[in-house]
Amino acid sequence: MSSTSTPDLPEKAPDESSKLKTFLSILRKFVGVSDIASVRFSLPAQLLEPTPNLEYWNYMDRPETFASIGTSEEPLGRMLEVLRFWFTKDLKYIKGKPCKPYNSTLGEFFRCTWEVGSTLPELPLPPSGQLVNGVSTVKDSNGKPVKVCFLTEQTSHHPPVSAFYIECAEAGVSARGFDQISAKFTGTSIRVTPGQHNLGIFINLGKRADEEYQLTHPAAHLGGILRGALAISVADTCYIVCPKTGIKVILQYLEEGWISRAQNKVEGVIFRYDPDSDTINRVKDVPEGNVLARISGSWHGQLYYTLAGTTEPQLLIDITPLFPVAKDLPPEEKQLSNESRKFWSGVTEAILDKKYGQATKLKQEIEERQRQKAAERQVKNEEWKPRFFTGAVTPEGKPTLSEEGTKALEGLREESYELKESDTKGA
């Protein structure tokens, strides 16, 4: 895609306040619309961050917390490791401003890796009646850093859904799920909830006989639109369950008082439950005899757990010094034409050069091509199918890798990035 064929349109670079005013004027048109995410409205380029949606939506802001899941020999310890990952997966919203990336196109995909060689404190647990402190080392058997691999593909356009798969083969841990959001503009903020196909993140510990954890997403609010300072707040309940160990977590994100300063507090409980008759959905309804530990703290700062029968909180994770870790991508010459970075490269270059008129035109050309391809498939009665996953969505919320998806992940592990251009090239 060449950016030289479209003449530049002179346009003053917008400051943050003017961007928000323009954004708000567009959003006002959607007051009362049940789900603005499904409308897929197109924003002018000057309101976008030069980031592809598939690259932006990942949960590996701190991949070492993911690679360390499953280290503990205790079921409670492994749930605490899952929680440590949970509280670090979206650092981008804590350490940076929320942004609107490019809308993904059908068949667009993104792949990357992270090398993890750091260590994390082992979580103090009472395996035999006493607390134990140590170090959980995230390295392979040869003492080398382990690799976390990430593959995602836009599998549906209406509604917009992407499938993802994450793995750390050396640690025997993987995760998968569908990303889809539903959004409603209230007039002062945007309420974002999981879409019908987004049933959470499913983490599997292959080295522990496929022990699986389901992590559901809470609703969130994008506020500060009227003040010109976007910020994400959470005031909802979410759950983590592991049917195999019979352990469940309820996390309650607390709503701030309208006059108080945001504290971003969260409290929760880890407890034994019956997977076959689970009816407990509130922290206060958990029988005290079933409690294993309690969670407290700020999801912007320090998180603690307090073991049942004790009164001394233990540090689970300190978010304060942490920032998102950079990704490693295939070399540009190895990326396909429908791979996110290359697919949007012309738009990105124009935005970075502050040539917003040119960026908007290139973006509109991409969107028009997608509409034309969809119309052609409809005329031919052709059904589009994903390349790296076996289906657009699944009832249980767990995407399955296709043969090409498995090979793509193997290529990431071995740093062999050769993939053939697809006939659809982004459908």
Image (cartoon, grey):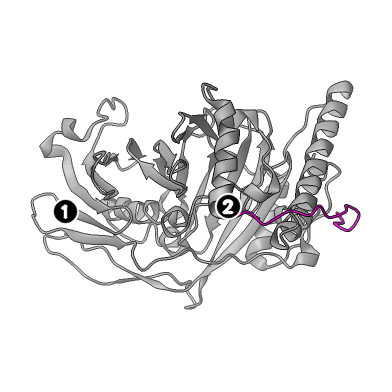
Residues at badges 1 and 2 in contact (C-beta under 8 Å)? no
- Mark 1, residue position: 306
**Main secondary structure along the magenta-highlighted residues:** loop
Query: Is residue 125 something one can see in this rendering?
Result: no
Q: Nearer the viewer, residue 54 or 39?
A: 39
Span highlighted in magenta in the image: 1-14
**Percent of width and height locating residue 170:** 51, 64
**Percent of width and height locating residue 371:** 81, 32
Residue at (67%, 50%) from the top-left corner?
A: 46
Residue 189 on the magenta span: no
Residue at (41%, 55%) from the top-left corner?
A: 94
Please give left or right for residue 67 compared with residue 387 in the image: left
Residue at (55%, 22%) from the top-left corner?
A: 33
**Percent of width and height locating residue 358:** 80, 52
How far, Cα to Cα, is label 1 from label 2?
Answer: 34 Å
- Mark 2, residue position: 56
The total number of labels drawn is: 2
Q: Which residue, as the protein is rendered here, is positioned at the far bottom?
A: 143
The image quadrant of residue 159 is: top right
**Percent of width and height locating residue 235:** 32, 38
Q: Is residue 413 above or below residue 231?
A: below
> Could you tell me the amino acid type at mark 1?
Thr
Residue 11 on the magenta span: yes
> Could you tell me the amino acid type at mark 2?
Tyr
Residue at (66%, 59%) from the top-left corner?
A: 410
Q: Nearer the viewer, residue 32 or 302?
A: 32
Please give left or right for residue 309 compared with residue 206 in the image: left
The image quadrant of residue 255 is: top left
Query: Nearer the N terminus, badge 1 or badge 2?
Result: 2
Q: Secondary structure at mark 2?
A: helix
In the rendered view of the protein, which quadrant contains the C terminus? top right
